[in-house]
Image: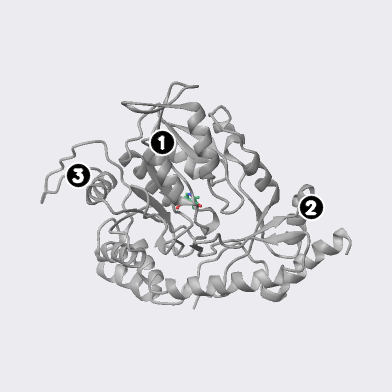
Amino acid sequence: MNRNQEIDSIIEALQQFFPVKNKPYPLHEPLFAGNEWEYLKECLNTNWVSSAGPFVDQFEQHLITYTGIKHAVAVVNGTAALHICLLLAGVEPGDEVLIPSLTFVATANAVRYCGAVPHFVDNERTTLGLDPYKLGDYLKEITEVKVRGCFNKQTGRRIKALLPMHTFGHPVDIEPLEQLSIQYQLALVEDAAESLGSYYKGRHTGSWGMAAAVSFNGNKVITTGGGGAILTNDPKMAQMAKHLTTTAKLPHRWAFEHDQVGYNYRLPNINAALGCAQMEQIEERIEQKRNLANQYSTAFKQIKAVQWFAEPASARSNYWLNVLLLDNSFETRRDEILDALHNHGYLARPAWRLLHSLKPYLHCPRSDLTVAEQLERQIITLPSTPVQGGSHE
Ligand SMILES: *Cc1c(COP(=O)(O)O)cnc(C)c1O
């Protein structure tokens, strides 16, 4: 097969799943197939639309039951959730936080909101997330653990936290990362924005760190329009998260008493209503996503130009986005392939631009990033909505 035929065969594979007549196909579309209309109407009928109301508590309870994590605090978006997680972790201005370079920009932005500095470390090919062994070697080389914590010998700054991300829903190799966090006195926080419904060794992602952030943006596995949550097993953290996200107001019938600078990050009831209806369907949605992934894996087996990315061993992924890795010989044609897919109505995307190459983060510390750089050249994410729906009645 010549090289252009290889590209045509990628398009033909996609045509099996997504018929020509419904194009274009975005990466991930919301699906409202349950009680969404009913619950939204209830908000309007009862006047509970804003930052208090029964759906917020119900939504948090859904998240607790589903993930098995003990506490959930619903907030306005995943980025706000990350910001609060890092504050809870004790990240202070001038600290460094270890994050992957291959992630959505929100991960680094949340670090900056705390006045801290992202320190970029490398990914691995088996999970697409942080490489714990490479990180271990790196920390051994560049850090010194003192009474006040772990210090970067090169910059003199304290490294306060480790913030891995579960890439496209695939669980990172979290156990050895947890080991490192203990060894180096780093607060472990998980960016689980993409991994609701993903498990590592049978345990839901987001349950290893001291706190985790999830997102319910319109393109995630389930949506509240915009929204996020802080998940934690620590009751004190949960209480602080709730306090900080509700303007740090002390409970009182009528007084405006605030004991610190808080944030107005609480998820509105109207968004939580959508979330409750979505959580009622999550098991089914994940099953549909895993089925689509399974079919994708078969469809791309014969195509030499690409390798479909399978969930890591000992993980059960939500397959939020299906990933193709371009063969080395096709790396230089990534953009051409993306153009061809778009011309046919498949709105495939590359990986995010590596964060250390973005203007606000050019001068941040980083380790060798060879694998992240290679993955950036090779990753293509595919339309991954399992069921076409979303029609407005
Ligand atoms: C979506 C996402 C976020 C942020 O979530 P928002 O709800 O859009 O603020 C953070 N990190 C990653 C990796 C994400 O994919």
**Which of these two is toward me, 170 or 276?**
170
The image's mark for residue 162 is: none
Q: Quadrant of residue 7?
A: bottom right
Q: Which residue is mark 1?
A: 113
SS at badge 3: loop
- Crowding around mark 3 (Cα neighbors within 10 Å: few <14, some 14 to 19, many 20+) is some
Callout 2: 10 Å neighbours few (<14), some, many (20+)?
some
User: Element under label 2?
Assistant: helix
The foreground one among 157 and 312 is 312
Q: Are marks 3 and 1 in contact (CB under 8 Å)?
A: no
Relative to 120, residue 17 above or below: below
- Earlier-in-chain disc, 3 versus 1: 1
Which residue has dot 3 on it? 249
**Residue 115 placement (x, y as % from top left):** 40, 30
Question: Which one is closest to the eye, mark 3 or mark 1?
Answer: 1
Residue 328, placed above or below residue 373:
below
Residue 164 image point, x, y percent: 47, 46
The residue pinned by badge 2 equals 330
Ligand 1 within 8 Å of disc 2? The answer is no
Q: Position of residue 366 (x, y in %)?
A: 55, 32
- The image shows residue 141, relative to residue 63, as above or below, that is above
Query: Which secondary structure lies at badge 1?
Result: helix
Front label number (2 vs 3): 2
Left or right, 220 with respect to 310, comes to: left
Amino acid residing under circle 1: Tyr
The mark that comes first in sequence, 1 or 2, is 1
